[in-house]
Image: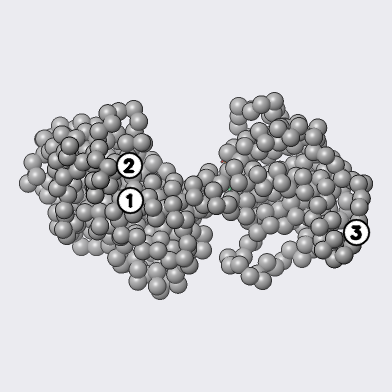
Amino acid sequence: MATSITVARDIKATVSRSPPISVSTSPATTFRSLSFHSSNSSFPKLSHNSYFPYHQPVEKQLKPFATEDIKILLLENINESARTVLEKEGYQVEFYNHALTEDELIDKLKDIHVLGIRSHTALPPSILKRANFPNLLAIGTFCIGTPTASLLPLARLGIPVFNSPFSSSRSVAELTIANIIILARQLLDRNAELHNGQWNKVSTHCWEVRGKTLGIVGYGHIGSQLSVLAEAMGMVVTFYDTIPVMALGKAKQVATLDELLIKADFLTLHVPEAPETNGLIGAAQLAKMKSGSYILNASRGSVLDIPSLVSALRSKHLGGAALDVFPAEPGVNGNTFEGYEELAGLPNVVLTPHIGGATEEAQRFIGNEVAEALVRFVNSGSTVGAVNLPEVALRGMKVGEEGSVRVIFIHWNRPGVLRQVNGILKDHNVDKQMSDSRGEVAYLMADISCVKEEEIKCLYDNLESLTSKIMTRLLY
Ligand SMILES: NC(=O)c1ccc[n+]([C@@H]2O[C@H](COP(=O)([O-])OP(=O)(O)OC[C@H]3O[C@@H](n4cnc5c(N)ncnc54)[C@H](O)[C@@H]3O)[C@@H](O)[C@H]2O)c1
């Protein structure tokens, strides 16, 4: 049976970026009725229930605009799983399988509500300064990285950036397992020899991996997946992490990196890029590794010092290395990999172009995860998964809660703002409220009830008039 709901709208404006806008940014709001259970409903199905599994199943659908008004620009051949999620919401999705030039991107930004990019769209602060993007609500980076230099400027504009840091964990772990066996059996050298017509059947310094010790540096999403896979092959797993971590299977945590270095037959690096991990493995650490042992790096290029590695391989102190990441990586495919000639000329060295997470499965997971985070933000204001704003979510409103409004107030994190906001909301019942801050920016969400339609504009104007305001959105 069709359930009728109040027309849902979004009031949002950023006076700092564009002139104030009228009550609704939806030129032709068309929500009339919504069937929550009918499969032939043309209205998109509720998507945010799954994120709030602990409360009533039937929620009021907050929709910021008529969905056909939401314009999404997806660049760089983002996986079709993302398009599916976004189009299901009724959004207009414009898709390119390549990156745009800076000028093309600036032109497109004028119009869109959400931008989806991958690693080849730099989005530096200089673009943000040049561009005019009055409607932009959020950015999705459909990869692990983010436009680091622009995260703060975007947060200051109230624009969250969502990414997908862990969708490729399994793919990286599997590549690492493959490389462990490749190194142990000198597979790539035999392969290259045979491609050149050279039959070289040798067993010297070729090993089974069963019974060998795998040393994992960084027992996070990837390190722990790897631990399980390696143990299934009969490896003895030890790991070093800066925090105490629950070991899986029979894996054992050691107290120091040095302890791991002297124990490991295979040392594999899975730490984040950070000042503390920059040059974590250099000449001194390599010297402590077992003679004939192997090193693998699929984390970040900055973690392992390449000249020291070249010396350790040349002197035969190490038996081989597998690198998927490099201190400087080309931005485009082609004959662009330069500066690693010494490494490339050495035996039993596996070099791959940062493909640890480059699988169909990982791309599909990334597409889904980022697109769903964007939908949650656009439709209900949730910033869960944002990398540059505090993560705030409220459970949904129930159908029938007419006269309810969700207030989203992104503001400078200053004393007294909550008092001012609550002063504005004081004539309404605040059903629920959550606020959090991250550095200088704070994010407040409150669901208020008993609001008459004619009061909404006034609420909006009052919030907009606060000097602490970065962005106001009202969803109802
Ligand atoms: N090659 C690829 O394509 C690819 C794909 C995905 C991720 N990565 C990279 O893999 C790395 C690990 O990713 P993850 O998802 O497992 O990260 P994660 O955050 O889940 O785990 C990292 C672990 O490292 C630990 N750690 C931090 N500093 C450390 C230090 N100095 N010494 C020891 N341990 C330390 C943390 O406590 C954490 O447990 C990251 O650098 C990520 O960028 C590469």
Name which residue lies at 49% across and 50% down. 364
> Can residue 404 be seen from the camera position used here?
no
Whether disc 1's CB lies below 8 Å from ligand 1 is answered: no
Asked if residue 47 is positioned above or below residue 159 in the image, the reply reads above
Q: Which mark is residue 47?
A: 2
Name which residue lies at 19% across and 43% down. 34
Which residue does the numbered mark 1 point to in the structure image? Answer: 88
Q: Is residue 448 left or right of residue 158?
A: left
Q: How far separated are the C-alphas under marks 1 and 2?
A: 10 Å
Circle 1: is it few (<14), some (14-19), or many (20+) Cα within 10 Å?
A: some
Amino acid, disc 3 = Trp
Pinpoint residue 402: horizontal percent, then vertical percent: 13, 37
Whether disc 3's CB lies below 8 Å from ligand 1 is answered: no
Ligand 1, by image quadrant, is top right
Which residue does the numbered mark 3 point to in the structure image? Answer: 199
Taking depth in this image into account, of 69 and 455 the one nearest to the observer is: 69
Taking depth in this image into account, of 266 and 154 the one nearest to the observer is: 266
Q: Residue 212: name its quadrant.
A: top right
Disc 1 vs disc 2: Cβ atoms closer than 8 Å?
A: yes
Name which residue lies at 74% across and 63% down. 340
Amino acid, disc 2 = Ser
Q: Along the polypeptide, which appears first: circle 2 or circle 3?
A: 2
| Quadrant holding the C terminus | top left
Q: Secondary structure at mark 1?
A: helix
Q: Residue 381: name its quadrant.
A: top left
